[in-house]
Image (tube, helix red, strand yellow):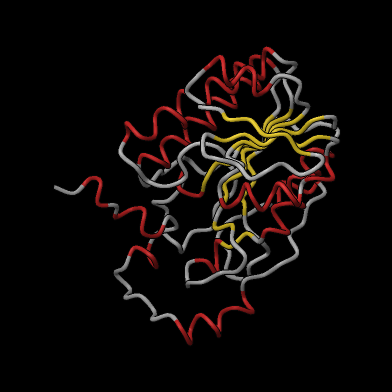
Amino acid sequence: MRRLLITGAAGQLGQVMRKRLAPLAKTIRLADLAPLDHPEQNEETMACDLSDAAAVHEMVSGCDGIVHLGGVSVERPFNQIVGGNIVGLYNLYEAARAHGRPRIVFASSNHTIGYYPQTERLGPDAPFRPDGLYGVSKCFGEALARMYFDKFGQETALVRIGSCAPEPINYRMLSTWLSHDDFAAMVKAIFRAPTLGCPVIWGSSANDAGWWDNSHLGWLGWKPKENAEPYRARIATHTPKPASSDPMVRFQGGGFVDNPIFKE
């Protein structure tokens, strides 16, 4: 690609991916509302408020691909979510439509299905069961992306990220962990595919204790290589096991189902 846009580039995952995805394009455009580090030789930076349609159009202009990590990434009151995750996503898709429909990797979330029990194994067609307003915003994002694909042919990978981190640090992450290497390899496969469409991709590594079935993705050419299981003994040594009634061991969304935003 000539130019790959990474939104949310100042965030934890954005900072990791800017380096790992650098070989994908001659220029990596890094965008965020928060301050960004000084750009490397093949990078350019841009401040952008996703709720500002004109700024988003400028951000997307000239880009061949988009990795959309921007917006609110945790549970928040609705007035803090709506600007980036609802209005901002609409602005992004309108900008993409106006600028040649560059392929998009949309960072959706496991919190779109957070109320499923951990005893269930889910495929890509499982109905939404969001565990909070953040999860609802990601359901909106997936529906918006699907509409733009059906109506305009805008291709998007709907990546329901589990827990993307250097290593798993609790019992739940033994099922949800997505290593940085596996995520970067997934993104590269998404942009390498001749035809993408609008698939749901479960964002997890090859965890023995995983809950999500990616067997529908053989055509993508991506197979995660890492597994959370080797970390189990360390977690057991350093982390008290939650009670059986704890949402962290009952629901796939973990603690998001018991967020204090909705308490009296």
Horizontal and vertical percent for residue 124?
A: 60, 44
Q: Residue at x 52, y 46 (%)?
A: 109
Image quadrant containing the N terminus = top right
Query: In the image, is residue 37 above or below residue 176?
Result: above
Horizontal and vertical percent for residue 48?
A: 56, 28
Which residue occupies the extreme left position in the image?
264
Horizontal and vertical percent for residue 93?
A: 60, 21
Query: In the image, is residue 94 above or below residue 172?
Result: above
The image quarter containing residue 36 is: top right
Q: Residue at x 66, y 22 (%)?
A: 149
Q: Is residue 15 left or right of residue 70?
A: right
Q: Is residue 43 left or right of residue 48?
A: right
Q: Residue at x 48, y 59 (%)?
A: 120
Give 201 or 39, whichever is nearer the viewer.
Answer: 39
For the image shown, how many numbered marks are present on the structure? 0
Q: Residue at x 37, y 47 (%)?
A: 131
Query: In the image, is residue 103 above or below residue 22?
Result: above
Which residue occupies the extreme front position in the image?
38
Horizontal and vertical percent for residue 139?
A: 47, 35
